[in-house]
Amino acid sequence: MSQQVIEIHGGKRALAEAEARIEKATRRAFYDVGTELRGIQEGGLYGKKAAGFATFEDYCQERWGWKRSYAYRLIDAAGIYDKLSPIGDILPTAESQVRPLTLLPDPDAQAEVWGRVVDVSEQTGERITARLVKQEADRKLAELSRNWITVDEWPDADDVDRDRALQIRQTSKVFNRQDNDSIEWARWSWNPITGCRHACAYCYAQDIATRFFPQGFEPSIIPERLGIPQASKPPRDAEMDVGWRNVFTCSMADLFGEWVPEEWIHAVFAAIETAPDFNFLMLTKNPQRLRSFNFPANAWIGATVDRQSRVRETEDAFADVVAPVKFLSCEPLSEPLTFERLDLFDWVIIGGASKSTRTAESRPDRAWVNALEADARNAGCKVYEKPNLLDRIREYPGGDR
C-alpha cells in the first residue's frame, strides 16, 4: 500500500474520531445550558442580591453575550427535550433541531413530528438535521391549517366556499426557487394544484408528495397559492437567462388531467395573467384536453411524450393549440420516437428517467437522442438536453444559452 493511500485512510479515521468526540461533547450541551438558564430565571438568581442584574435579559446579555431570543430558545428547547425523552432513545442533538417544534401547538404534535423525523431517518438513512425537522413540522402545520381542497371534496363544497377558494388573495409568498439542475429550464416552480392520477412508475413527484404533503398525491387545490404570481418579481438574472423567467407550473400535478375541474384551470390562468413578466410552463399527459382552452399570452404549453404511442394524439391536439411556445418533453425517452409534425412545436426537451422508489435512474440510448434531435433541427425546433444526458445541448425559445 502506498504512503499516499495510508495517509488518506489515516486522515479519514482521524476525522471520524474527532467528529465522534465533538458529537459526544455537544450532544446534550444545548439541553444542559437551557436547563441551567431556566433554573436561574425561575429562581431569580440573576437578581441584584446574587448577580446584580435588574432583569434576566440583562443578565444573559452582560454575562454571556446572548440576546434575549437566543436565551429563551435554549430554555424552550430544553423543555421540549424533556417531553421527548420518554418516547425514544433518539433525541435532538442541537437547539436548531428543536426550534421547528416550538411552532407546533402542543406537546402531542411535537412528539408526533419528532417520531416522523426518526422514522424518515431510519427508513432513508438520512441524517437528522434542522432542515429535516422543519420539513416534517411544516407538514404537520399544513395538516392543522387544512389549506387544501381535494378534487373529491370539491363537488360537496357550496358556492360560497368555491368562490372563496378561486379568488386571488394577496400574499407575501413568492415562487419556489428550484435549485435542482435537473429542472434548470425553469428556475421557479408554482403549485396551486397538486396531485395526479396517471400513476406513472417513474414519477418522482409522487414520492415527494407522499413524503411531504399532508394530502399525499391526491389531486387538490391550494387556494392561498393563487396570489403568488402577483407577489413575485423576476430577478436581474432573468435579463440574461430566460430560465430565471420561467415558472414550472403545477410541477407536482397534471393541470389538464381529466379529473381537474375546469374552474380550477381557469383560476390558474387568471393568476398567470397577473404576472406578465414571467413565462408559465405547463406539461400534460392528456393533450387532447388542451383544445378546450384559450391560453394566457405568457403560457408555454407542453406535452410529455415518452413513448411512440403518445405521438399521434399529441400532434393531433397541438394542431389546434394556440400558444406563444409549444413544446415537447421527451423525458424519460424510453424508446426511439418518430414524429410527423414536429413543425408544430418550438422546443424539444430530452432526458432520461430520474430515480424513484419504483424505478432506477436510466439514460436513453444516444442514438435515439441523436435521431430525435436531427428531426427537431429539421423542423426548426430548439433542443434542450437534461443533465442525465452526458454532452448536453441547452437552448431556449427566444434566446440561446
Image: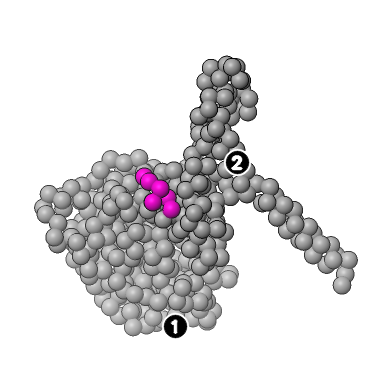
Work out how far the residue at label 1 is from the one at label 2, CA to CA, in angstroms. 60 Å
Colour mapping: one colour
Look at mark 1 in the image and give the residue it sits on: 335
Badge 1: few (under 14), some or many (20 or more) residues near its Cα, within 10 Å?
A: some
In the rendered image, which quarter contains the N terminus? bottom right
30 with respect to 116 (left or right): right
For residue 246: magenta?
A: no
Mark 2: secondary structure: helix
Q: Is residue 71 above or below residue 6?
A: above
Task: Say which of 233 and 31 sits in front.
Answer: 31
For residue 109: magenta?
A: yes
Which residue does the image show at 55% across and 58% down from the upper left? Answer: 89
Residue 32 numbered tag: 2
Task: Say which of 116 and 382 sits in front.
Answer: 116
221 with respect to 64 (left or right): left
Which residue does the image show at 57% across and 23% down from the upper left? Answer: 46
81 with respect to 327 (left or right): right
Task: Say which of 98 and 366 sits in front.
Answer: 98
- Identify the magenta region: 105-111
Which residue does the image show at 44% across and 65% down from the upper left? Answer: 382
Residue 364, position as x, y percentages in the image: 50, 78
Q: Is residue 155 above or below residue 103?
A: below
Mark 1: secondary structure: loop
Residue 92, position as x, y percentages in the image: 55, 51
Which amino acid lies under the numbered mark 1 shown in the image of this protein? Answer: Glu
Q: Is residue 259 above or below residue 68?
A: below
Which residue does the image show at 41% across and 81% down from the upper left? Answer: 337
